[in-house]
Image (cartoon, grey):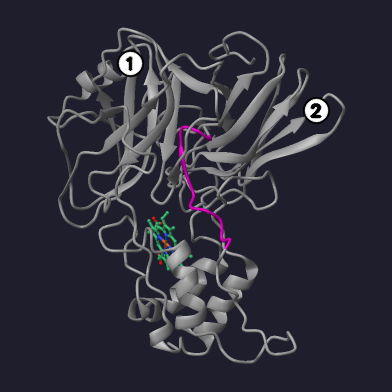
Amino acid sequence: MRALARYAPPALAVAACSVALGPAGAPSRKAPTYASNVAPILNRQCVECHRPGQVAPFSLIGYENARKWSGAIVQMASARQMPPWKAVHGFGEFADERRLTDEQIQTLSDWDAAGAPRGDAAREPKPPTMRSGWTLGEPDLLLQPDRAYHLAAEGDDVYRNFILSTDFKEPVWVTGLDVRPGNPKVVHHVIVFLDGMGAAQRLEEAQNDGEPGYTSFGGVGFLPTGALGGWAPGLRARLAPEGTGLLVKPGVKLVLQVHYHKSGKPEVDRTQIGLYLARKPPEKQIGLMWLMKPGLKIPAGEQAFETEIDRRIGRDVTVYGAMPHMHLLGRMMQAEAGLPDGKRVPLIKVEDWDFRWQMAYGFRKPLRLPAGTHIRVSARYDNSASNPRNPNHPPKDVAWGEQTTDEMFLMIVPYTLDGPGEPPSFRMP
Ligand code: HEC
């Protein structure tokens, strides 16, 4: 999903040095200041979400905001809870990794400990101006729900699924997806699923609550036949690798799932997606490996329930990224490729799974896996009463399913076949 998802902003190539170096190159004892050391970090890594009208609950633009939040900033940065990026550093290699370095965390912490000094206000860097338009240029096709959706002021998060009206008469090749949240204050993340079975339509009709779309609890309410990608605030749109594209056949519906965070006020949203299309069929069709375990059963009370699957790839393939998916009990998920020569290649690992941050991670470089490679996916779940996210009190046995109270074990890996042919759907290549 490298291509079809939006990813994190560019890595911290030019972030400021966190420690001022003295003449001999030794760290000086001067405390870091907002103007010289902290503002560059916050501007680069935080303010795209922490600014007015965006999904984060407060702004981190300017000295006053940063000072007011300095303690919480250090806490969240040290725990690596912010910026949100769940893939473990060093296990797999990702494009646009969004991550603070240890030195940057130290800088934030030293700054807070020194009383959050401002430094020379005249030298403060300007916060970046954010592009609000389409990052990949004008899309070929704009789609949005027929009407605006009304979100209540308070209560649990909502997963709302909108069937986008498309009426493709010909196969369509999608090479990119971008998302323009209608109301960035409440749009937490977005996934676009494909439905070739008319399942979404039936769900919408059954729910029929007067608002566009239907609400689901954890998934989309059905097993999708594919996905075009996912997006979360601050993640950048990318085009599919040269010569590749994702096929949407006539009759297949696009289902836009929006995860809403309530704001305390009634809100209205009509999120738009932009699709980029190939002029002619690309050489290679992107397929999705759905590495999943529908037989999943997690016993009540078990704090560290571990399970895994091993799937053999029968063809030479190139893989582009990974998107782990679990629900509320999930704690860890990882994928590794075991090559025929015995070599093990780490793909992705999420150690501190957070259901609210569903992200598609793109590999830094496409990875070729020869026929005979095994992909091993393992996961750990906490179904004990001490898991604060456990939806069942007391805990009960939980199996694979679509509801909040159910679980999932799913890793989606976009790939292309290195030889001719069409990637099979729902079977391993
Ligand atoms: C992709 C968007 C995004 C980015 C980037 C981001 N945040 Fe956040 N932040 C959020 C959201 C959304 C919340 C609200 C809580 C949640 O949803 O987890 C939040 C909450 C917080 C909180 C409050 C946590 C609490 O509940 O007490 C702090 C502190 C914070 N962020 C600091 C930072 C810092 C520091 C950075 C940069 C290093 C950063 N954030 C980058 C989206 C973001």
Callout 1: CB less than 8 Å from ligand 1: no
Q: Is residue 207 above or below residue 185?
A: above
Q: Say which label, 2 or 1, has the lower sequence index.
A: 1
Label 2 beta carbon less than 8 Å to ligand 1: no
In this rendering, position of residue 211 left or right of residue 397 = left
Which mark is drawn over residue 29? none
**Residue placed at 39% from the left, 33% from the top?**
177
Measured along the vertical axis of the image, is residue 139 above or below residue 168? below
The residue singled out by tag 1 in the image is: 199
| First to last magenta residue range | 2-13
Horizontal and vertical percent for residue 77?
53, 67
Task: Identify the residue at horizontal 87%, vertical 27% (top origin).
Answer: 341
Q: Amino acid at mark 2?
A: Leu
Direction left: furthest residue: 210
Residue 58, percent from left and from top = 32, 66
Q: Image quarter for residue 49?
A: bottom left
Give yes or no for residue 129 being in the magenta stretch: no
Give the percent coordinates (x, y) of residue 362.
Answer: 56, 39
Label 1 environment density (alpha carbons within 10 Å; few <14, some 14–19, many ≥20): some
Which residue has dot 2 on it? 339
Residue reaching furthest right? Answer: 341
Position of 172 relative to 239 (above/below): above
Classify residue 131 as left or right of residue 99: left
Q: Is residue 12 magenta?
A: yes
Which residue is found at the position 61% from the left and 39% from the top? 363
Residue 292 seen in this snapshot? no
Type of secondary structure dominating the magenta stretch: loop
Q: Is 107 on the left-hand or right-hand side of 82?
A: right
| Ligand 1 sits in quadrant | bottom left
Pointer 2 local density, CA inside 10 Å: few below 14, some 14–19, many at least 20: some
Q: Mark 1: which amino acid?
A: Ala
Measure the alpha-carbon separation of dots 2 and 1: 38 Å
